[in-house]
Image (tube, helix red, strand yellow):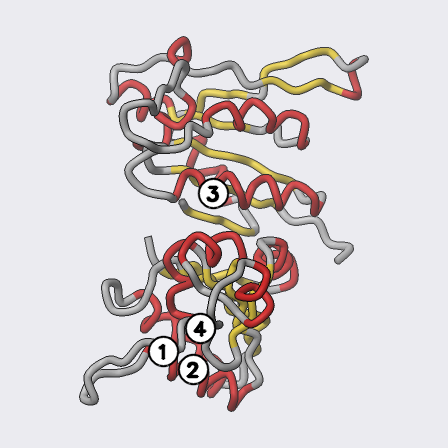
Amino acid sequence: MSETKKFVYMNRKAPYGTVYALESLEVVLIGAAFEQEVQLVFVDDGVYQLTKNQSTDGIGMKNFSKTYSALGDYDVNQIYIDEQSLKDRGLTMDDLQELTYEDEDDDWAEKSSMKLVNREQLAELIGNADVLLNF
Amino acid sequence: MKFAIQINEGPFTHQAADTAYQFTKAALENGHEIFRVFFYHDGVNNGTMYGVPPIDDRNVSAIWSELAEKYDLDLVVCVAAAQRRGIMDEDESKRHGKGAANIAPKFRISGLGQLIEAGIEADRLLVFGD
């Protein structure tokens, strides 16, 4: 397996209500060991996966939202948020947790992994994917 | 072409596993290669041997087993998703102190790395289901 491919994970669903968000994250974390290029996209209700201060006390579900902050340590640092999806839900980047990574090419400076994208940029991201996984 | 297949929904509620089956069968009949079929989310439920649908309906698990037998397909059920949903082979069943295995013939249980590997090795990874 010498080839490097671009894996794009489309996260489209709310963190709770269905298992897709959790089981997507599990694929991303396992996949990180394969040293492929990885991009995560959060679109539609998927933007709720990254909201701050999640509490699942009332619904008996495991709160896995803190796991996202570990992505930087797995070299998963290309995280794209669909701007329109945020707007449609009355959210801004301030409502989301800050995901960062340490840039080894820049003396391990801490940098943001998150980037807002419009629909045109999103289409380009999808078009450039070698492997597109929808969750 | 070399295809990999991912199935995300269980049998019967969704048609995804049926559509994936039809695609896989057609691809094989037309000389294409199927690198692997990977069952994830509720898709792992396609791997049970205990489904007994009415006699005039298709048995989704059984037709996968038959296709795998004929073409020596690699049918992989995700272990983490399977543990949650109670799909087990002999080893898993013993390890978790359960009474019996329920995995259908020609299916095997393995990790998510098998999905990533399929994405890398295949020319196209096709995903069926939500």
User: Relative to residue A120, is residue A7 depicted above or below?
Assistant: below
Chain ID at mark 2: B
SS class, disc 2? helix
SS class, disc 3? helix
Q: Is residue B24 visible?
A: yes
Chain ID at mark 1: B
Q: Position of residue A66 (x, y in %)?
A: 51, 23
User: Relative to residue A2, is residue A128 depicted above or below?
Assistant: above
Q: Position of residue B97 (x, y in %)?
A: 53, 61
Which amino acid lies under the numbered mark 4 shown in the image of this protein?
Asn
- Find disc 3 in the rendering and name its residue: A24
Categorize mark 3 by other alpha carbons within 10 Å: few (<14), some (14-19), many (20+). Answer: some
Q: Residue at x 42, y 27 (%)?
A: A63
Q: Residue at x 58, y 54 (%)?
A: B112
- Find disc 2 in the rendering and name its residue: B25
- Find disc 4 in the rendering and name its residue: B102
SS class, disc 1? helix
Alpha carbons under labels 2 and 1: distance apart: 5 Å
Q: Is residue B21 left or right of residue B59?
A: right
Chain ID at mark 3: A
